[in-house]
Image: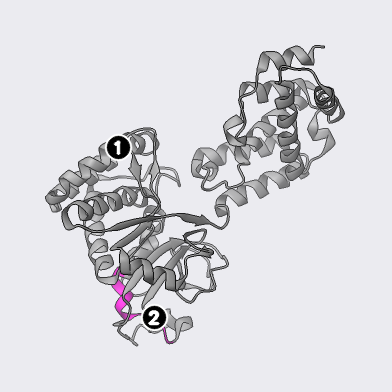
């Protein structure tokens, strides 16, 4: 019987770490296609509510069913509802995602490393990120403030002793994220009961029926804030030692990959207008696919620029990079190379590199529209470069 299990929440097929500590858990299985993993739709479950709760349907299933899961025959775990084998030896439970894991010394956190951490700390969370605004203001800007208000009201009603921790978190700017954690089984059960008592009470005041697919996962987003309140309370009031651990990303978000593939296919079919329309509508519904943690290659802002440039050039009857290649990967590479050349043209001194950069722009049919888009929407932060100097570049292009 294992001492620790880290459940990997997933809605898609992926390659899990080889360590037996990691156990894939198919969340929302009641609504999705069979993936071949243990699902969250047996026993007492809320699997059908996955569009509202996200990975929390996995939390709920573990909370209600963990004592009865058989690890002796893991392939048949869902079918063995009558074979209720107690997991008395399981001491710790962890939660991660199909593409986000706790980082160890040489990649994925190993079982030995996890057990060592838990011998020193009461709980492991994701590393803390610092936002530009207060937590409440950040949530209100991205989601719906009234849902947070309802949740905090339920927290106050059910657990008033958490009021001070809630105030500190909502007025603060540094938080762990992703509902990622490792903690003792008993504390996980307590946390889950606390979490769902609050969320299910708040649900009577929350109506996500008009929300798009992204914002409809309201309870998952609220839980990220609640985790920080739980952590703050137990740090301050219980003396818990909390370890914010670095997160290892293994792949881009599956929806991000799907969007890029769809755009690439339409571009190959000579349908850039349809590609741009698809891109804009998709990001309107799922803005998270363009977040840095989802778009690990940093390509979504480049793709947005490219689609605008291609459509603009075609409408004006101007030759451009789309006449050179219709391959999205090559177009992204050309964009990056062009940015490098514009950096050279930003330099004060004249040199052979300047002449080479000007030759590149002509050779690859870099249109005026493309240059203007890149100057007016400088992606210097994405490329970790100094900001372009538009006037100097324009002056050189006129020479």
Q: Main secondary structure of the magenta part?
A: helix
**Of the image marks 2 and 1, the number of the one nearer the N terminus:** 2
Q: Which residue is drawn at 66% across and 17% down?
A: 390
Kindly state the secondary structure of the residue where label 2 is placed: loop
Residue 265 position, x and y percent, is 72, 47
Residue 343 position, x and y percent, is 70, 26
Disc 2: which residue? 2
**Residue 274 vs residue 132, the one in the foreground:** 132
Q: What coloring was used for the rendering? A: one colour
Dot 1 alpha-carbon crowd within 10 angstroms: few under 14, some 14 to 19, many 20 or more: some
Q: Is residue 193 left or right of residue 159?
A: right
Above or below 354: residue 112: below
Q: What segment is highlighted magenta in the picture?
A: 63-72
Residue 394 in sight: yes
Q: Is residue 23 left or right of residue 117?
A: right
Image quadrant holding the N terminus, namely bottom left
Disc 1: which residue? 136
């Amino acid at each position: 019987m294992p001492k620790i299990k880290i459940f990997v929440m997933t809605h898609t097929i992926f390659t899990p770490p080889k360590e037996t500590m990691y156990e894939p858990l198919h969340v929302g299985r009641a609504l999705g296609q069979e993936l071949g993993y243990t699902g969250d739709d047996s026993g007492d479950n809320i699997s059908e509510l996955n569009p509202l709760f996200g990975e929390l349907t996995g939390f709920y299933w573990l909370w209600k069913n963990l004592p009865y899961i058989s690890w002796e025959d893991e392939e048949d775990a869902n079918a063995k509802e009558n074979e209720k084998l107690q997991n008395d030896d399981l001491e710790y439970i962890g939660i991660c995602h199909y593409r986000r894991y706790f980082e160890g010394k040489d990649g994925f956190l190993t079982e030995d490393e996890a057990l060592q951490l838990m011998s020193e700390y009461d709980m492991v969370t994701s590393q803390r990120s610092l936002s530009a605004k207060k937590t409440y203001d950040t949530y209100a800007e991205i989601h719906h403030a009234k849902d947070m208000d309802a949740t905090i009201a339920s927290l106050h009603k059910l657990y008033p002793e958490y009021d001070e921790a809630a105030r500190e978190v909502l007025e603060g700017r540094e938080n762990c994220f992703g509902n990622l954690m490792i903690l003792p089984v008993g504390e996980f059960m307590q946390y889950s009961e606390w979490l769902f008592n609050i969320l299910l009470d708040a649900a009577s005041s929350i109506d996500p029926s008009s929300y798009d697919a992204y914002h409809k996962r309201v309870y998952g987003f609220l839980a990220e804030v609640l985790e920080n309140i739980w952590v703050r309370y137990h740090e301050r009031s219980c003396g818990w030692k909390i370890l914010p651990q670095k997160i290892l990303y293994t792949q881009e978000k599956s929806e991000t990959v799907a969007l890029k593939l769809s755009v690439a296919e339409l571009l190959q079919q000579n349908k850039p207008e349809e590609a741009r329309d698809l891109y804009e509508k998709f990001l309107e519904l799922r803005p998270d696919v363009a977040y840095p943690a989802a778009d690990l290659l940093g390509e979504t802002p480049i793709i947005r620029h490219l689609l605008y440039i291609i459509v603009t050039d075609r409408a004006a009857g101007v030759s451009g990079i789309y006449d050179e290649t219709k391959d999205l990967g090559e177009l992204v590479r050309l964009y990056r190379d062009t940015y490098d050349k514009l950096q050279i043209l930003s330099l004060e001194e004249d040199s052979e590199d300047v002449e080479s950069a000007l030759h590149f722009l002509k050779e690859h049919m870099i249109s005026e529209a493309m240059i203007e888009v890149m100057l007016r929407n400088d992606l210097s932060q994405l490329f970790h470069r100094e900001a372009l100097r538009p006037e100097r570049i324009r002056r050189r292009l006129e020479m």
